[in-house]
Amino acid sequence: MGNKNKTISFRVSQEKFETLRGIAEERDISLSAVFRDYVDLLVAHDGQVEVVPEHELNESTNESSTAESFPPKVEVPKSFVREHERLELEAEHLREQLEEHKRYVTKLRQELDEYDQEDVVHLDELDGEAEEDDSPYRIGSDFDDSQF
């Protein structure tokens, strides 16, 4: 299959084009090489590239002992990293439980759809039948203690 080169095209203003061509001539390379070098640098540094004029670069290297490096780096305590990993695992576990619950609810809905509507007993309907019944249940009121 091999490693094939791809072509990227974009538009720049005439002024910027002349500037880029001047940079290429100054370095005695082609304009394409300028872009290839930039893209290679961008990929090598994972998109963290800052383009600055050369005279500012020389000034910043003299001040590099006091200035931060680019890209900035922050040291994080191990406890923070462990807590973050624990929370990621917990979130993953909760996502799995949610998916399992969704599958269970879907299964129950499918089973409910399979039953005939007459097989379903609604509790509200049962309450309505009890009120219509002529002999409601009573506890202790019809008890005759003379039999004992």
Image: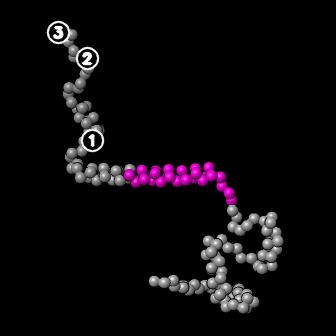
Q: Amino acid at mark 3?
A: Gln
| Numbered mark located on residue 122 in the image | 1
Sort mark 2 into few (<14), some (14-19) or many (20+) by Cα contacts within 10 Å. few
Mark 1 vs 2, N-terminal side: 1
Out of 52 and 9, give the one closest to the viewer.
52
The amino acid at mark 1 is His
Which amino acid, mark 2?
A: Gly
- Front-most of 17 and 123? 17
Q: Secondary structure at mark 3?
A: helix
In x, y percent, where is residue 35? 64, 84
Q: Residue at x 51, y 85 (%)?
A: 4
Q: Residue at x 23, y 26 (%)?
A: 136
Q: Which residues are magenta?
A: 74-100
Frontmost residue, 91 versus 103: 91
**Label 1 element class:** loop
- The correct choice, above or below, for 86 with respect to 12 in the image is above
Q: Is 141 above or below relative to 67?
A: above
Which is more N-terminal, label 3 or label 2? Answer: 2
Q: CA distance from mark 3 to mark 1?
A: 41 Å
SS of the residue at dot 2? Answer: loop
The image position of residue 33, as x and y in percent, is 65, 87
Badge 1: how crowded within 10 Å, few (<14), some, or many (20+)? Answer: few
Q: Which mark is residue 147?
A: 3
Side of 103 where 135 appears, left or right = left
Magenta span includes 98: yes
Asked if the residues shown at circle 1 and circle 2 are in contact, with their CB atoms under 8 angstroms apart, the answer is no
Q: CA distance from mark 1 to mark 2?
A: 30 Å
Judging by the rendered image, the residue that carries numbered circle 2 is 140
Instruction: Left or right? Give the position of 36 relative to 88.
Output: right
The alpha-carbon separation of the residues under discs 2 and 3 comes to 14 Å
